[in-house]
Image (cartoon, rainbow, N blue to C red):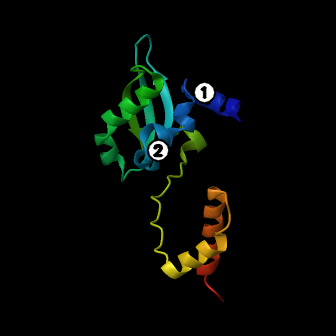
């Protein structure tokens, strides 16, 4: 898997595969929901590269304003000023999945839980020593207690 990502990334100029595999960690969750890295191109003999980023047309103006922050975060991954320019594209003919990118919508707020159901779920999971397992059991109990009945 790692070699497949590395080869795909290198084919599009990404010397650091982390830029592809950890895009959300590099640029932040908010920017990652709205953008996808497409390729990095290097000029002849010039220092600095151009990063092409796929963005929705409706988000392009906001991303344009955040380009200095985006460039700083990307260059932090490289450890030096590797990227001098960022080019925004709304259709990526040479991008991953041939220009088709699925942008992640903002997460929905968790519904408010009835305190009585939360108390029942805690009763179900009490006595479990492992905190991770106890939390998972409470969540399962909450899901079962709140599901719609036919």
Q: Which residue is mark 2?
A: 91
- Does the image show residue 51? yes
Left or right: 33 in relation to 117: left
Q: Residue at x 64, y 29 (%)?
A: 6
Q: Which residue is mark 1?
A: 11
Q: Quadrant of the C terminus?
A: bottom right
Which residue is the extreme one toward the top?
Answer: 45
Above or below residue 45? Residue 138 is below
Q: Residue at x 46, y 65 (%)?
A: 108
Left or right: 30 in relation to 137: left
* Residue closest to the eye, 2 or 46: 2
Query: Mark 2 falls on what kind of element?
Result: loop
Residue 60 percent coordinates (x, y): 35, 46
Q: CA distance from mark 1 to mark 2?
A: 19 Å
Which residue is the extreme one toward the left?
Answer: 65
Q: Choose the circle earlier in sequence order: 1 or 2.
A: 1
């Amino acid at each position: 898997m790692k070699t497949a990502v590395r080869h795909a990334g290198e084919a599009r100029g990404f010397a650091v595969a982390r830029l592809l595999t950890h895009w959300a960690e590099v640029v932040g969750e908010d920017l990652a929901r709205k953008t996808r890295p497409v390729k990095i191109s290097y000029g002849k003999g010039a220092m600095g590269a151009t990063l092409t980023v796929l963005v929705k047309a409706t988000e392009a103006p906001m991303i344009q304003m955040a380009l200095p922050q985006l460039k700083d975060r990307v260059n932090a991954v490289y450890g030096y000023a590797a990227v001098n320019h960022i080019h925004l594209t709304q259709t990526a003919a040479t991008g991953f999945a041939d220009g088709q990118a699925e942008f992640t919508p903002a997460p929905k707020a968790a519904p408010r839980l009835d305190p009585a159901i939360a108390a029942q779920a805690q009763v179900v999971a009490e006595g479990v020593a492992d905190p991770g397992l106890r939390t998972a059991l409470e969540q399962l109990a909450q899901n079962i207690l709140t599901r719609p009945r036919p």
